Amino acid sequence: MVVLAVVAILLSIVAFATVTTSQSVQQFYTLEKARRNAESNQVELKLHVKNVARALRSQHVLTALTATDVAHLSTTILVSELEGIDSQPLTQFEVSVSHDSTNATYTAKFLRYPSLLRLPTSAQQFSWDSQLTNWLFNRDASALSANFFAEVESLTQCHNMLSGNVFWITGDCELDPSDLPHNSSSNPVLLIVADGDLTLQAHTHLYGLIVMLSSSHSPYTLRVASSASISGTYVSNAPVTEQINGTATLSTPLLKALQENTVLAKIIPIPGTSYDHD
């Protein structure tokens, strides 16, 4: 009888230990699942904020919200219009995203600014400056490429160009009236010609900013036919051989409109402004 009693006690202890262990394991898995779900939710929130910021680079707030809408997420955007030290148009966005089924929220601030950081100075207009790209784009000429611009057509010739606003041409560029039919005083373009001559043929009118770049500092040629014109300005990082029989007219408002076009915009996170909260 004593032996049976001892066995019964041992079995009770084993059963209790088994139940306790099972409960502990279940509790561990429950907590681990909750932790993983919370981490997954935070990753989703942060990814969504980044997607919203990408959309805000070139879109209005309502358009960006529609384009990035996710059924179980709620997004709010606060907008502050700012002006840089050189009168650059700047926009600050505070983006907050939360899960509809939880209290988890992630907030981050972003700054949208023009890649054409500054307009040409009076000394640079219709002239050259070896430090030109540092002034315009905050990039040394050796580090500047078509990839610097978010929306750019990178070409090796200038015929039948698409309806864009930013063009990077490597080599010679000859423009006739049919090549940029969408270009106008209300729709200026940024035309960068790298290591090549630029020719505006008869009756060709270009509105915007022409940037001629020379990687070897060898002079290239700008030709403007007698019935052609440039409205805006042209600049270069090296001396340019000018054969201008047409007109070249400075238009600061047109250059300003180009700078403000969101096709030239960049957007970056503002350091130290992102945080999680419930």
Image (cartoon, rainbow, N blue to C red):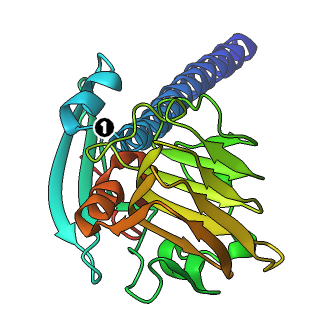
Rendering coords of residue 135 (x, y %): 50, 81
Quarter of the picture containing the N terminus is: top right
Residue 83 lies left or right of residue 208; in this view the side is left
User: Which SS class for mark 1?
Assistant: loop
Viewer-closest of 253 and 206: 206
- Residue 145 lies, with reference to residue 213, above or below; the image says above
Residue 114 lies left or right of residue 239; in this view the side is left
Rendering coords of residue 60 (x, y %): 23, 38
- Residue 31 lies, with reference to residue 106, above or below; the image says above
Q: Residue placed at 38% from the left, 70% from the top?
A: 272
Rendering coords of residue 268 (x, y %): 44, 59
Q: Residue placed at 57% from the left, 43% from the top?
A: 152
Res. 123 in view:
yes
Q: Residue placed at 76% from the left, 42% from the top?
A: 156
Viewer-closest of 263 and 75: 263
Viewer-closest of 61 and 205: 205
The residue identified by callout 1 is 59
- Residue 104 lies, with reference to residue 101, above or below; the image says below
Res. 99 in view:
no
How many numbered tags mark residues here? 1
- Residue 230 lies, with reference to residue 18, above or below; the image says below
Residue 131 lies left or right of residue 273; in this view the side is right
* Residue type beneath disc 1: Gln
Q: Residues within 10 Å of mark 1 (few under 14, many from 20)?
A: some
Q: Quadrant of residue 21?
A: top right
Viewer-closest of 258 and 21: 258
